[in-house]
Structures are given as structure tokens and as C-alpha cells.
Amino acid sequence: MRITGAGVCLPFFRNGGKPMLAVLSILGMIVLDQAVKLWAVRVLASIGDIPLINGIFHLTYVENRGSAFGLFLNQRVLFMVLTPIVLAAVSIALWRGIIQTKTGKWSMYLLFGGAVGNFIDRIIRGYVVDLFYFKLINFPVFNIADIFICTGAALFFIYFQFQHKPVEQKKEVETDG
């Protein structure tokens, strides 16, 4: 089923998916991420650090000008170019039905929502707001969009390793059965 809105075809409507659930979930991820980051900018930035469990888990305001784990520091243009390419690839994979299971589709929704959340930061602020800090193990400070991206990547790994069937194999199963 192909549904369009304002002349734009959304990829989440193909192959019997639940379009509103997908779109609302992605929008919810983006809104949650941006709301928490807005709080961090307005409140946490002036405080700097709030120990929730002292010495273990803190809310710590960080302006991240790189990617995860401090890689690609000050490469904003790189991310401004790569993010839309990744979002297009995810959309195309969903639209063409390449992603075959719910696990695979949800991995894409999580990656999409997280990528958009961090992309908005890079557009508006020039950096990504991070705030969750596992101080006990000195884990890099991260945000909600990062959680979505990492969870999506983990789900995609599970999907690809255990559920994905090559197109030829999928067609054989459909014609045999």
C-alpha cells in the first residue's frame, strides 16, 4: 500500500507495516530526545553536574563536537553530509521491503529516530548535547538519541545474523510454500 502525505511518500507504509505506529514512534523518540536536551541546555548547563548515584551515575552537561566516544572531533560538515545519506538508506531499505522482520524494522526506526535527534542538535547548536555519565567506569557521556542508535544497531545485528534472508532465498521459500 502506498500512502502519500503532502506529495511525499513515506517509506514506513510498505509491506504491511503499521505506518502510524512507526511514524509516531519515531516522532516520539525525537521529541523525547529533544525535550531532555532542552532541559539539559536550560538547567543542567548552568549546574554542570548532578550526581544521581554519587560516583556511579551522574547527569553531566557536555557539548559534543564529535561522534560517539569522541571520534571525528570537529567534523560537523562530515556529519551534516553523512546523516541525510544514512537516513535515505534506511528509508530506501524500509520502502523496498529489504528489511523483512519486526526486529529489523524496529532497528531501522530506532536508528532513524536517534540519527534525526542528533542531526537536529548539529543543525541548531553546532554540537550534540550529551548528559548521561557512568562515572564509575568513566564511560563517555551520551544522550537519549545515542541510546536509540546503539539499541537500533544491536537489534540490526541480531536481525542480520539470525533473521535476514537473501532475496533469492526469500523468493525460493515463497514459491515453494
Image (cartoon, rainbow, N blue to C red):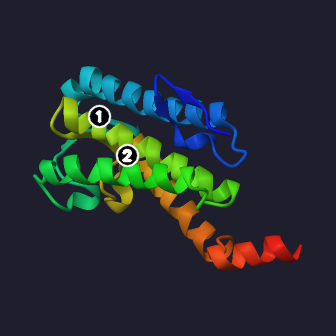
Q: Which residue is found at the position 15% from the left and 37% from the top?
A: 126
- Marking on residue 162: none
Q: Which residue is mark 2?
A: 115
The answer to which of marks 2 and 1 sits earlier in the sequence is 2
Vertical relation: 129 (above or below) 76? above
Name the amino acid type tagged 1. Answer: Ile
Q: Assign the N terminus to one quadrant of the image.
A: top right
Q: Which residue is found at the position 82% from the left and 73% from the top?
A: 175
Kindly tell me whether residue 111 is visible in this rendering. yes
Q: Assign the C terminus to one quadrant of the image.
A: bottom right
**For numbered disc 2, what is the local secondary structure?**
helix
Q: Residue 109: give x, y in percent of width and height.
A: 53, 46
Q: Which residue is mark 1?
A: 120
Asked if residue 43 lies left or right of residue 88, the reply is: left
Kindly tell me whether residue 49 is visible in this rendering. no
Q: Residue 63: give x, y in percent of width and height.
A: 19, 40
For the residues labelled 2 and 1, the Cα–Cα distance comes to 9 Å
Q: Which residue is found at the position 47% from the left and 22% from the top?
A: 6
Q: Which residue is found at the position 36% from the left and 62% from the top?
A: 137
Q: Residue 19: give x, y in percent of width and height.
A: 64, 35
**Residue sitting nearer the eye, 55 or 132:** 132
Q: Residues within 10 Å of mark 2 (few under 14, many from 20)?
A: many
Q: What is the tally of numbered marks visible in this picture?
A: 2
**Residue sitting nearer the eye, 18 or 45:** 18
The answer to which quarter of the image holds residue 139 is bottom left
Name the amino acid type tagged 2. Answer: Ala
Q: Residue 101: give x, y in percent of width and height.
A: 69, 59
Of all residues, the one furthest to the left in this rendering is 74
The answer to which quarter of the image holds residue 157 is bottom right
**Residue sitting nearer the eye, 127 or 51:** 127
Asked if residue 169 lies left or right of residue 139, the reply is: right
